[in-house]
Image: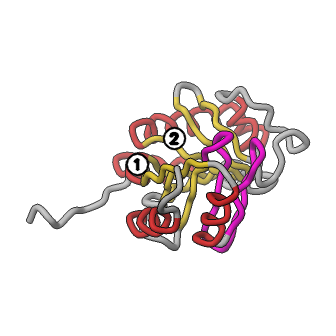
């Protein structure tokens, strides 16, 4: 039937390749996709807007570059002076978008479900910072890019939103169309570091 939609991970075609590669990398580098995470772009300004969002989401929007705030399974990432990316594993995208729109009714804002256009990739391991540095221009040293920070950048030719989740853990949010390329580049970039880290 036309209404029986089946969601497929953007990495479905290379799942076996990822599993094989990560199996041989031990603690040096691990890559795990979290497909179908709810992602909603939110834009707006003002005290009334911020208060309405706080009531709706249960979190305060970060106000500085690189900021991130969380409440339970909901996370708000600062994307610009009046733009945030809301991430959730507890909400269905359409429901969260509808809830935010209702909460912000009458206010000048934008709420857009972008979940189907992106995937979330968790990467971790002793080589993770060196692997990212091979294709990302950001200074990822913990003293500069600390735990909980996020930034928009690129990994080789793929535009990414990068979040630090601990000393040896990062999250990449990447467009579906670049997800396979990004993962293959990550697996290729770890190769020169294997002897040093294993």
Structural distance between the alpha carbons of marks 2 and 1: 8 Å
Q: Is residue 56 visible?
A: yes
Residue designated by label 2? 183
Question: Residue 195, located in which quarter of the rendered image?
Answer: top right
How many residues crowd mark 2 within 10 Å: few (<14), some (14–19), many (20+)? many
Q: Is residue 169 magenta?
A: no
Q: Residue at x 64, y 48 (%)?
A: 45
Name the N-terminal-most of marks 2 and 1. 1
Residue 106 on image: x %, y %: 49, 59
Residue 116 on image: x %, y %: 38, 52
Query: Which one is in front, 175 or 192?
Result: 175
Query: Which one is in front, 90 or 183?
Result: 90
Q: Residue at x 68, y 71 (%)?
A: 71
Q: Residue at x 64, y 37 (%)?
A: 152
How many residues crowd mark 1 within 10 Å: few (<14), some (14–19), many (20+)? many
**What is the quadrant of the N terminus in the image?**
bottom left
Q: Is residue 64 magenta?
A: yes
Residue 189 on image: x %, y %: 62, 32
Looking at this view, name the residue that lies furthest to the left.
1
Question: Residue 9, located in which quarter of the rendered image?
Answer: bottom left
Query: Which one is in front, 3 or 198?
Result: 3
Viewed as shown, does residue 84 lie left or right of 128? left
Question: Residue 55, located in which quarter of the rendered image?
Answer: bottom right
Q: Residue at x 54, y 32 (%)?
A: 159
**53 w.r.t. 183: above or below:** below
**170 w.r.t. 155: above or below:** below
Q: Are marks 2 and 1 in contact (CB under 8 Å)?
A: yes
Q: Which residues are magenta?
A: 59-83
Residue designated by label 1? 11
């Amino acid at each position: 039937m036309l209404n029986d939609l089946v969601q497929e991970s953007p990495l479905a075609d290379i799942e076996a390749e990822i599993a094989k590669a990560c199996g041989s990398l031990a603690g040096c580098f691990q890559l795990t996709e979290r497909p179908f995470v709810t992602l909603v772009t939110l834009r707006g300004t003002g005290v009334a807007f911020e208060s309405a969002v706080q009531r709706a989401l249960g979190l305060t929007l970060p106000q500085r570059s690189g900021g991130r705030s969380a409440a339970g399974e909901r996370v708000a990432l600062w994307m610009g002076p009046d733009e945030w990316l809301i991430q959730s594993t507890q909400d269905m995208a359409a429901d969260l978008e509808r809830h935010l729109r209702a909460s912000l009714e009458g206010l000048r804002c934008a709420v857009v479900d972008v979940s189907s256009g992106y995937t979330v990739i968790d990467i971790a391991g002793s080589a993770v910072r060196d692997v990212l540095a091979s294709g990302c221009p950001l200074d990822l040293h913990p003293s500069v890019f600390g735990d909980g920070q996020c930034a928009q950048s690129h990994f080789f030719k793929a535009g990414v939103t990068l979040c630090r989740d601990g000393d040896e853990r990062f999250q990449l949010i990447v467009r579906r169309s670049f997800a396979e390329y990004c993962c293959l580049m990550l697996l290729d970039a770890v190769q020169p570091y294997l002897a040093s880290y294993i």
